[in-house]
Image (cartoon, grey):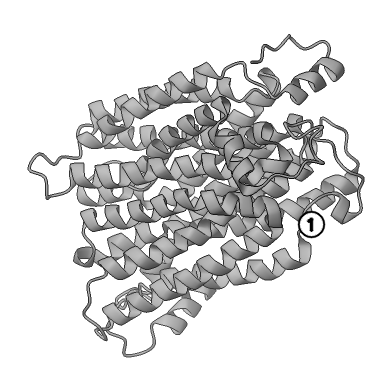
Amino acid sequence: MSLWIVISCLAIVIGIYFYNNPLKHGPWFLSRRFINWFPLGMTYSFLYMGRYNLTIAKSAFGSLMTTEAFGLIFGIGTTVYALSFFVNGPLVDRIGGKKGIIIAALGASLANLILGVITWLVLTGRTHIPLFWPFVLIYALNMYFQSYGAVSIIKVKANWFHVRERGIFGAIFGTLISFGVYFAFDWGQGIVDTTKVAAPVGSLGLVPALLRQLFVPTGSTANATWAIFYVPAAILLVWVILDLWLIKETPEDAGFPQLETHDASTGHMQEVYTRLELLKKVLLSPIMLMLGGVELTAGVLRNGIMQWYTVFANEVNQPGAEGILANWGLLLCMFGIVGGFAAGLISDKFFQSRRGPPAAIFCAFMLMMAAVMAMNLFKFPYMVGVAALLIVAAVTGVHSLMSGTAAADFGGRKATATCSGLIDGCVYLGTGVQSVCVGFLVGSEWSGHSWQWWPIFLMPFALVGGIIAWRIWNELPAATRKYIAEHESKAAPVKTA
């Protein structure tokens, strides 16, 4: 049933994509652009499956991986992810997004295969080494290759979408993230459950039965948890083949005239930037630093919920909210889609493609929901679960606007990967901060440990994110402002710095 719900959501997203055509593109352009972004986006979604499968594996490992160890592994990996953008962003701006997404998928596939081998060796008793250090090293390698993903999809997007269309693409970007979360949590949990030695086999469908045949042969005595790493690795290789065949870097590569997108690169496309110049473009830009600040707080809130709710719900009984835990991946997907589309439509329809206003509104909403969680954490489990899902909806909207849209708007096509990469890197710096801090605050090594600190820790970051987003409320690239003035004269005047 959940798969059909996700497929229905995907059909609705595709319908909205074709319906939303403010620049009146021809039907073949819309179709060819869909053929471009769909395989690119699905590759990105399955990269997520190969990233957050660690969270599901942690619960399956039991005492083999403590809460503190999990927090450190995830925190170190996400810090590597963030720092990698100083290299990978300028590189993708030079080699293009198509090559970048292929590097991401191949590297993440290899890293997941190695994680699967390590898990197999430990669980079958072929080695007795602790999981911690091998997972630290290989998960960090996985996250290095993962860092090519977002910058590559946004690099290609910048060439194919006009600024006035990018709000809706930000919504699509948020949807792709949400699908990846669904694959990671629901498919991942399904893989773990299916490959347990004691799992019931009488009513298994075709795919689960095939998984058992592959990973749990007759006579097995160990749960085949390593399958949660092997499956996304194999799926990513399939998408690599499709990417090589279908993706075109620019409309010109697909036989269309050049598309003028009216972003920050308008009038500067002939310029050539060195890696140092690209980095300066980001690090010395006040607007880019503020976008990064919003994203750092978003990273704390986003993974502060997605990473820890299932751990919390497995450690602290949640009577009345069992359905939320059982369908966590599907609910994350659905709420993420709603949040991404709400943010994109609000930005394009009500604020002339300004990204600050919806980000500020959503940050204020997240602050309220984190407060609801803090006040009801041990009293009303269902309310806590719903508040957590609403935070996911809001933070997906903020993330899709900042990394998926605003970075490309203000960075321009020439520097899209560098700008979006470093801004997206701030998300994972925030993720690393929360991963280590929450793991410490709720872990058994600290005498004052309590899950009560979890939502309280998130609240100041929502407040700071909202303040920064409010500071960029009126910001637009100069080329976008000029385009609005020339083509949308009836629109309300927009103040820009």
Decide if residue 281 is in sight here: yes
Q: In this view, does 360 lie to the left or right of 444?
A: right
Q: Decide which of 7, 356 is in the foreground and name it.
A: 356
Residue positioned 64% across, 24% down in the render = 347
Local secondary structure at mark 1: loop
Residue positioned 24% across, 63% down in the render = 65
Q: In which quarter of the image is the C terminus?
A: top right
In the displayed image of the protein, which residue is found farthest to the left?
Answer: 447
Residue positioned 34% across, 54% down in the render = 76
Residue positioned 75% across, 35% down in the render = 265
Decide if residue 183 is in sight here: no
Q: Decide which of 103, 238 is in the foreground and name it.
A: 103
Image mark count = 1
Q: Point out residue 274 in the picture as x, y percentages from the top left corner.
A: 66, 47
Q: Is residue 25 left or right of residue 467?
A: right
Q: Decide which of 92, 200 is in the foreground and name it.
A: 92
Q: Point out residue 148 in the picture as x, y percentages from the top left corner.
A: 57, 56
Q: Point out residue 233 in the picture as x, y percentages from the top left corner.
A: 52, 70
Image vertical order of residue 472 relative to residue 193, above or below: above
Amino acid type at mark 1: Lys
**Crowdedness of circle 1 by 10 Å Cα count: few (<14), some, many (20+)?**
many
In the displayed image of the protein, which residue is found farthest to the bottom?
Answer: 219
Q: Point out residue 305 in the picture as x, y percentages from the top left corner.
A: 36, 41
Q: In this view, does 487 lie to the left or right of 338?
A: right
Splitting the image into 4 quarters, where does residue 239 fall?
Answer: bottom right
Q: Decide which of 260, 269 is in the foreground and name it.
A: 269
Image vertical order of residue 116 relative to residue 51, above or below: below
Instruction: Identify the residue under disc 1.
Output: 248
Q: Is residue 186 left or right of residue 103?
A: left
